[in-house]
């Protein structure tokens, strides 16, 4: 695996703290991880990413049923930042002519935002 061409991601400890659990699936040699975390209202996010393929997928479940799934390729960076005391997972995707950003946080409840801007 050529790490110079892979998506930048937070380290395992940061991801563990953000998702409050170990990954539900993990194949580090293939560059793949999948995490789940729910909120106080019973919403569940499954977030999977592959740093070699530079892809990410977010799936939202309500009462056990999948109600939304968004996949994106061209992931440049996944980071965990803090804004106003809230930890946010931020994913930057795209190229010079278009940019897509994913933001996820769980405080006080699950919030998922996909935003795209193009030329």
Image (spheres, rainbow, N blue to C red):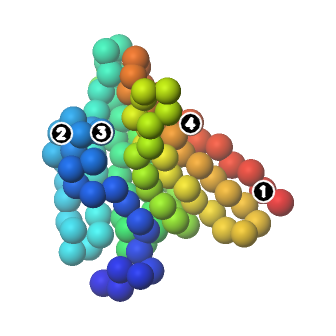
Badge number at residue 6: none
Badge number at residue 118: 1
**Residue at 27%, 57% in the rendered image:** 11
Callout 2: helix, strand or loop? loop
The part of the image, by quadrant, that contains residue 85 is top left
Question: Where residue 18 sits in the image (x, y, percent)?
Answer: 30, 39
**Residue at 41%, 74% in the rendered image:** 6
Label 2 vs label 4: CA separation?
22 Å
> Mark 1, residues whose alpha carbon is within 10 Å: few (<14), some, or many (≥20)?
few
Question: Where residue 70 sits in the image (x, y, percent)?
Answer: 51, 46
Front residue (pair 100, 14): 14
Question: Where residue 99 sits in the image (x, y, percent)?
Answer: 67, 57
> Mark 4, residues whose alpha carbon is within 10 Å: few (<14), some, or many (≥20)?
few
Label 3 vs label 2: CA separation?
8 Å
Residue at image mark 4? 113
Q: Are marks 1 and 3 in contact (CB under 8 Å)?
A: no
Label 4 vs label 1: CA separation?
17 Å
- Against 7, residue 22 (above or below) is above
Image position of 21 (left or right of 9): left
Label 1 vs label 2: CA separation?
35 Å
Residue at image mark 3? 18
Image position of 56 (left or right of 14): right
Residue at image mark 2? 21
Q: Residue furthest left?
A: 22
1 or 2: tag closer to the N-terminus? 2
């Amino acid at each position: 695996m050529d790490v110079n061409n892979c998506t930048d991601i937070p380290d395992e400890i940061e991801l563990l703290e953000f998702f409050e659990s170990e990954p539900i699936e993990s194949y580090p040699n293939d560059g793949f991880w999948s995490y789940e975390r729910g909120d106080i209202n019973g919403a569940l996010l499954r977030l999977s990413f592959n740093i070699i393929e530079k892809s990410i997928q977010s799936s939202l479940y309500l009462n056990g049923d999948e109600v939304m799934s968004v996949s994106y390729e061209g992931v440049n960076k996944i980071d965990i930042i803090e804004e106003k005391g809230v930890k946010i997972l931020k994913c930057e995707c795209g190229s010079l002519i278009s940019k897509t950003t994913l933001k996820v946080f769980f405080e006080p409840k699950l919030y998922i935002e996909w935003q795209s801007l193009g030329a």
